[in-house]
Image (cartoon, rainbow, N blue to C red):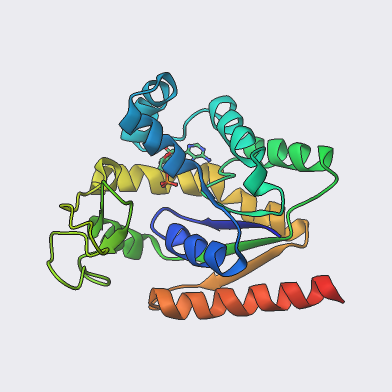
Amino acid sequence: MRIILLGAPGAGKGTQAKRVAERLGLPHVSTGDIFRKHLKEGTELGRQAQRYIDAGELVPDDLTCAILADRVAQDDCAGGYVLDGFPRSQGQALALEKLLAAQGVGIDLVIDLVVQDEEVVDRLSARRSCPKCGAVFNTKYNPPRLDAGHCDVPDCNMELVQRADDKPETVRQRLRVYAEVTAPLVAYYRGAGVLEQIDCSGLNPDEVYERVRAIIAAKEASLTT
Ligand code: AMP
């Protein structure tokens, strides 16, 4: 199954995509994570992407589509994948469609996680992540159980950090970009008949996941009949 998690920054795409991927035994493909890996390793691609990421802008489509095409061409993606943070523009959606059409397949399901802007700013200012293992916490809603400032994944214990692009001014810019460039994809995928929306306001990650799970179960049932 090929699934897209759509939604504003901070809507919970990463958290839900990870759980969905685990449940379905599919790879979780996050273009944001791929860019952050390049930044950390100091590659040329990371250098090119950095200024866009730091400014809360989208990395240009040519660069982003190239890393996505590269990733989904890997063997583990042959049976499907869960996309998180891609596509984020009409150009990327069209590039993905072309890539899939060449393989004779398509997107099965797009789940749009709907949250209000104020909730996004509130959530992201409290988001912390582990620079070593990538675990994500929220100091308000999902704090580490053992020690507030450290990762509690067994044997990790790294000091948690705030992503530079989670600072409030950058978050507001990311929201503006989302509204202008990414939000039109909701109508695009509705038109394609693959869109499901979840109103996430006031729901915790487990409650959102329950809804996500039900949507996927219904899709699985429809694909087998
Ligand atoms: P994320 O972790 O998905 O919020 O992505 C972090 C940042 O990486 C974004 O704010 C963009 O600067 C960049 N990025 C990630 N995915 C994409 C994409 N599909 N298109 C353009 N830029 C992206």
Using the image as rendered, state which of residue 217 and residue 173 is in the foreground. Answer: 217
- The relative height of residue 145 versus residue 89 in the rendered view (above or below) is below
x%, y% of residue 124?
29, 57
- Dividing the picture into quadrants, the one containing residue 204 is bottom left
- Dividing the picture into quadrants, the one containing residue 219 is bottom right
User: Does residue 53 appear left or right of residue 125 in this picture?
Assistant: right
Furthest-front residue in this view: 155
x%, y% of residue 102?
83, 37
x%, y% of residue 79?
71, 54
Residue at the image position 42 percent from the left and 43 percent from the top: 33
Using the image as rendered, state which of residue 167 and residue 214 is in the foreground. Answer: 214
Which quarter is ligand 1 in?
top left
Quadrant location of the C terminus in the rendered image: bottom right
Furthest-top residue in this view: 44
Residue at the image position 61 percent from the left and 58 percent from the top: 26
- The relative height of residue 60 versus residue 110 in the rendered view (above or below) is above
Residue at the image position 18 percent from the left and 58 percent from the top: 157
Using the image as rendered, state which of residue 63 and residue 171 is in the foreground. Answer: 63
- The relative height of residue 19 versus residue 162 in the rendered view (above or below) is below
User: Does residue 158 appear left or right of residue 51 in this picture?
Assistant: left
- The relative height of residue 175 versus residue 139 in the rendered view (above or below) is above
Quadrant location of the N terminus in the rendered image: bottom right
User: Does residue 144 appear left or right of residue 50 in this picture?
Assistant: left
x%, y% of residue 205?
40, 73
Using the image as rendered, state which of residue 138 and residue 23 is in the foreground. Answer: 23
